[in-house]
Image: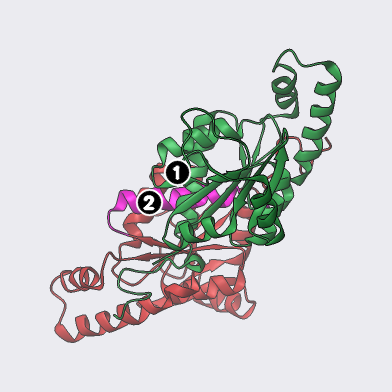
Chain colours: A green, B red
C-alpha cells in the first residue's frame, strides 16, 4: 500500500485559497479535505467528524501539551488544530489529504511532516492582491492597511514551499494542482513502481 | 530567464518510448526533441540540424575524447551521441528538451545532468512487454530470447529514475508526462516565483 499524499495549500491572506481548494475537491474526488479539531461549539447542522471534530477547551489544551497537533491556532477566541494521528491514519490507508491553511500554520506542518507537498498559491500580481483585500468592503482603513502589510510579508514566505501556483483563474490553478498531485504520485521516491514490482514478489 | 527542463524518457526495449514521445511532442508544442549527432550518412530528405547533426567518424571520436557527449552509443556500425553544448544552449534559452533514449544512455545522462527529470516508461505488465517483444514478428527464437532477458534486466533500473509512468495507453502516458512537466516547471527549486519576484526588482 503506497501512502497517501499530504498536500499543504497556503498563500497570503486574500489570495483565494478556499475557492481554489473547493474547486480542486470537486475535480479530484479521491482527494479529501483534512478535518480540523475545534473548541468552537457546533453550529446547527454541523456533524461531529464531518465539518470538524468538536472538543472542549481543557481537552484541546491537553492535546497541545501532548504535541498532538501538526498545527493549531486561535481565531476569534476559538481554538482550531489539525490532529497528527487523524492525518497519519488517513495517509497510511492510502488517502490523499489537503490542508488549506494560512502561512504560519503551513510552516508548522512543513516542519513536522517533511514529506508533505507544499503549494504556495500566489496572486497574478501584488496589485491584484491589494485590490482583493481593499475590495472586501466595509472594513476601516487601519484594518485594511494592516491586512495589506500582512499579505506583503506573507508573500515573502513563498521560497520555503515546494511549488508555486498562480491563481489567475480558479480553474487553471486547480488544474495545475491536480497535475502536481498526479506527478507526485508518480514519483519513484514516493513508492511508485511497475505493476508486479514493489511489495509483491515478481 | 528560467532554464528549460531536460526530460529523459527511457524504459525497457519494446515498451513504446518512441510512440509516447511522438504523441507528447504533438500535445506539448513548447517541448522539443533533442537532436543527436551521428556518423550515419544522411538519407534522402534528411537535413543537417533537423533529424540529426551529421559528422565524420574521426570528428566523432575526437568529440568522445573531449567529453563532448552527454551520452553516445554505437548502433549497427554507426555512432550516435547527444552533444553537451547543444543541450546546454537550448536549456539556457528557456527551451524544454526531451531525450528519448535507452536505459544505458539514460544512465549516462543522469550522471552528467543531475537536474534532468528522468521518467521510466513501464509496461502495464511483464506479460504485456513479452508479447510486444515476441509479437514483433519474424526474428529468430534466440534473438527474441535475448531481447526478453535484456528487457527484464532493463526493468530493474526503474528505481534510479525520478518518475514512473505506465504505458497503458499512449494518450494516458503522454498526458501524465505532460502533467509532470507542468509540475516540474512550478517547482520553486527550479526558479518558479510569483510575478514581480525573482530576478526583477519589486
* Region of the chain picked out in magenta, as a range: B167-189
Whether tag 1 and tag 2 are in contact, CB under 8 A, the answer is no
Q: Position of residue B27 (x, y in %)?
A: 40, 42
Mark 1 belongs to chain? B
Q: Nearer the viewer, mark 1 or mark 2?
A: 2
Q: CA distance from mark 1 to mark 2?
A: 9 Å
Q: Which quadrant would residue B104 be assigned to in this image?
A: bottom left
Q: What SS does tag 2 mark?
A: helix
For label 2, the residue is B174
Q: Position of residue B119 (x, y in %)?
A: 46, 63
Q: Crowding at label 2, few (<14), some or many (≥20) Cα neighbours within 10 Å?
A: many
- Indicate whether residue B186 is drawn in magenta: yes
Q: What SS does tag 1 mark?
A: loop
B39 up-or-down from B18: above or below: below
B54 up-or-down from B140: above or below: above
A197 up-or-down from A90: above or below: below
For label 1, the residue is B28
Instruction: Please tell me which residue is depicted at 18% across the width and 69% down the height of the picture.
Output: B136
Name the residue at the bottom extreme.
B142
- Indicate whether residue B171 is drawn in magenta: yes
Q: Crowding at label 1, few (<14), some or many (≥20) Cα neighbours within 10 Å?
A: few
Q: Main secondary structure of the magenta part?
A: helix
Which of these two is toward me, B81 or B7? B7
Q: Is any atom of residue B189 visible in this view? A: no
Amino acid at each position: 500500500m503506497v501512502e497517501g499524499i499530504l498536500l499543504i495549500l497556503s498563500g497570503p491572506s486574500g489570495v483565494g485559497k478556499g475557492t481554489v481548494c473547493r474547486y480542486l475537491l470537486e475535480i479530484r474526488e479521491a482527494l479529501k479535505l483534512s478535518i480540523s479539531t475545534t473548541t468552537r461549539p457546533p453550529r446547527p447542522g454541523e456533524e461531529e467528524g464531518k465539518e470538524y471534530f468538536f472538543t472542549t477547551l481543557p481537552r484541546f489544551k491537553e492535546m497541545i501539551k501532548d504535541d498532538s497537533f501538526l498545527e493549531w491556532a486561535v481565531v476569534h477566541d476559538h481554538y482550531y488544530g489539525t490532529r497528527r494521528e487523524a492525518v497519519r491514519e488517513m495517509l497510511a490507508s492510502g488517502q490523499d489529504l489537503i490542508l488549506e491553511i494560512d502561512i504560519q500554520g503551513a510552516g508548522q506542518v512543513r516542519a513536522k511532516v517533511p514529506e508533505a507537498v507544499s503549494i504556495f498559491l500566489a496572486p497574478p500580481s501584488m496589485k491584484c492582491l491589494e485590490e482583493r483585500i481593499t475590495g472586501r468592503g466595509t472594513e476601516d482603513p487601519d484594518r485594511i492597511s494592516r491586512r495589506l502589510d500582512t499579505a506583503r510579508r506573507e508573500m515573502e514566505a513563498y521560497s520555503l514551499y515546494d511549488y508555486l501556483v498562480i491563481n489567475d483563474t480558479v480553474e487553471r490553478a486547480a488544474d495545475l494542482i491536480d497535475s502536481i498531485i498526479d506527478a507526485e504520485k508518480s514519483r519513484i521516491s514516493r513508492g511508485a513502481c511497475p505493476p508486479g514490482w514493489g511489495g509483491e514478489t515478481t
